[in-house]
Amino acid sequence: MKKKTGNRFLGLTLSGLMVLGLTACGNSAGGDNGTADQPAKEETAAQGTETSSDEKIVLDVINYHVGTDYAAEYYAYLFEAFQQTEEGKNVEFHFEEIPTTDAFNQKIKLLISSGDLPDIVFNGGNNITELAAKSGKVADLTPYFDADPDWEALFDETSLEFNMVDGKIYGVPVSKEISYIYYNKDLFAQAGIEAPEVAYADWNAFFEACDKLKAAGITPLGMDTADSGWLTNLWMSALIGTNGEAGNQWMNSMYPTEFNTPEVVAAAETVQRMFQEYTTADAVGGKYDPMATHFFNGEVAMFPNGPWMIPDFSETEKAPEGFYDKVGIMLMPGKGMEMVPTPGDMVGASEEEKIKAAVDFLKFETKPENQIKALEMTGLQPVSNGLEIPETLIESDPLMAQVLEIQDQAEVTYGQNQAYWYQNTIDTFSTELPELAYGNITPEEFCNKLSESAKKNQE
Amino acid sequence: MKKTPQGVIYAAKVAKYLFLIFFTLIAVGPILWAGISSFKTYAEINSSALSWPSSFRLDNYRAAFQYAPIARYFLNSVIIVGISVLVTVVLVAMCAYIISRFRFTLKTLIVLLISASLMLPAQAISQPLFAIFQKLHIFDTKAGLIIVYSAMGIPMSFFVMVSYYKTISTALEESAYIDGASFLQTFLCIILPLAKPGLVTIALLQFINTWNEFYFALMLTSGDSARTVPIALNYYMGTFANNYSALFAAVVMTVLPTILLFVILQKQVVESLTAGAVKG
């Protein structure tokens, strides 16, 4: 009995010590608020959202750029730098951190319906602009654009239109999303292929190169199906978007409901062939990270993605040393490139003073210098056209500079499913891809399933 | 009686151990895998799920603390889950006893209401809860989450306990009353000790459900003071930048104390589960 009690006591002490250890380590690293590298995270300016006693304007922000998010460091810089400006010196931020965009989108939808939006509303990938605007809980920013023509001139018409609801601007676009193909120069050389300067003339030339790679024992393409099938989505969008005027128009339309068009069926047929002949065995059921590792490890020759992947090429945790120099960039066959405007950040404040402070922050966020800074730190593409790229970037990050250069040579641009399709259709795409890949369903049946799913949104 | 051949006994023994090893592996495998993965690099994790780490370095554990307020969220979890388990067990133990033993006017209505709350999806009640909690000033507090978790745990635990009380013979209570015990004495000294296995079961169920709960922990909090471990784990899953190495390290750190505690108290748990057996 004594022994039993002794063991129990020893065990409980051990557990207690582990918990204490965990706490002690946590405090030393991150303090009460945890994340050590998140400045200004402290619940600044006392509590709540009112103007504090020393006349500071307190802005509530829900920030999902935290933890391991690719832009966490950049946004930490941005908030701090804004407070050093004339417009921001009297502003303090009251942060709520929500890691991951999925969690952020869940919460922001609840806050839209309850009317408790933060003063600055980031747009977390899912396009919530229309939902927020129709709820009447976000500010109409048109007067602020009208009053500042220099600011308005930073954005092209498409980007602003993408953020309009009923003719009023509600979102400030902060970047553009683009994607193209990364290729491994060494593997191309090994297969005796010379990569095109800009892009393969057409898909036939592209698949000829794939056959040569395959003949040299190299897996040509990176693909996936899980987590919305991001990589496969980029291939499929390119196949549709570069298939003549009809395909391009289709791939540029929002919320399509009819997928049984010749271009989409042809693309599905090609995707099926790509799964069966040109990709890794684990692509079916695979998700982005292991597929990216295949590319980093030189196991696949071509990988579709956007510029946010570039910092990973030189991160030795992920890719072997020197990998950055092995990577080349080309557009999709037919000089195609995915390019979609992004849903912009909004203002949820209702008091005039706060709206103005929030707009000042959004102006700061979209200043040309900060667009370049975002490009350098995160790979986010500037929303403004024709920004002057600093010489330092060309020297420090030649791939990123090449991205900026090559995108001007795109002759065909189109959207991609995660930006333009209904959410349930994106899910169907991901769940039905394995069936298509294994040949359990025909490309026509695959397209029918997408149509059925999309049409549910109109019932 | 014919003697069983030695070979058959030996084969049965081997089969028994193989069976036990198989289920032990199923139970322990994921934990071991997470433990091993917590020492691997991003590239090692993504290259092969079953490979051995190139070295046992602690960088991932350092990174786990760097990215997320894991320690604070862990302590919040311990407090919130601990109290909600206690509240659920105490309330359900009393409520289920009354429902299982007595007849009264509103009994059917009460049971119906409790059953109905089982059907409510979290998403349907999140907005009203959000508004009520703000009005009551319990938004973003541990007390708020304890109330929600206890309330969510009550219906399922209630039905488990009602069924359990029904297995206890009423003759025991009648004997106690004949011997002069009061209602409270009968409940506390006769029924509750016999109901220990049921109570341990609902405590475990409640613990598992609330320890892993994510949705309300996200919706009903806005700062670090009441957020729990599932949210901390999301910090390692950023857009285009998952840090699985740090994630596994965080999982190991948050799961290990709980497992250790369970291993230590295992005897008590098993004893509680079998304590209800009425000896003939």
Image (cartoon, rainbow, N blue to C red):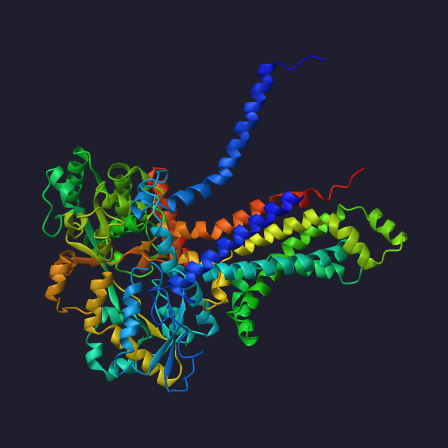
Looking at the image, which is closer to me, B77 or A453?
B77
Question: From the viewer's perspective, is B219 left or right of B101?
Answer: left
Q: From the viewer's perspective, is residue B19 above or below residue A173?
A: above
Image position, residue A29 (x, y; %): 38, 62
Asked if residue A364 shows in the view, the reply is: yes
Q: From the viewer's perspective, is residue B104 above or below residue A276?
A: below
Asked if residue A141 shows in the view, the reply is: no
Picture quarter with the C terminus of chain B: top right
Image position, residue A157 (x, y; %): 22, 71
Image position, residue A13 (x, y; %): 55, 52
Residue under the point 32% across and 42% down: B55
Picture quarter with the N terminus of chain B: top right
Residue under the point 19% across and 35% down: A214
Q: How many marks?
A: 0
Question: From the viewer's perspective, is A113 left or right of B180?
Answer: left
Q: From the viewer's perspective, is residue A359 above or below residue B113?
A: below
Image position, residue B169 (x, y; %): 80, 46
Residue under the point 40% across and 49% down: B248
Q: Residue furthest top?
A: B2
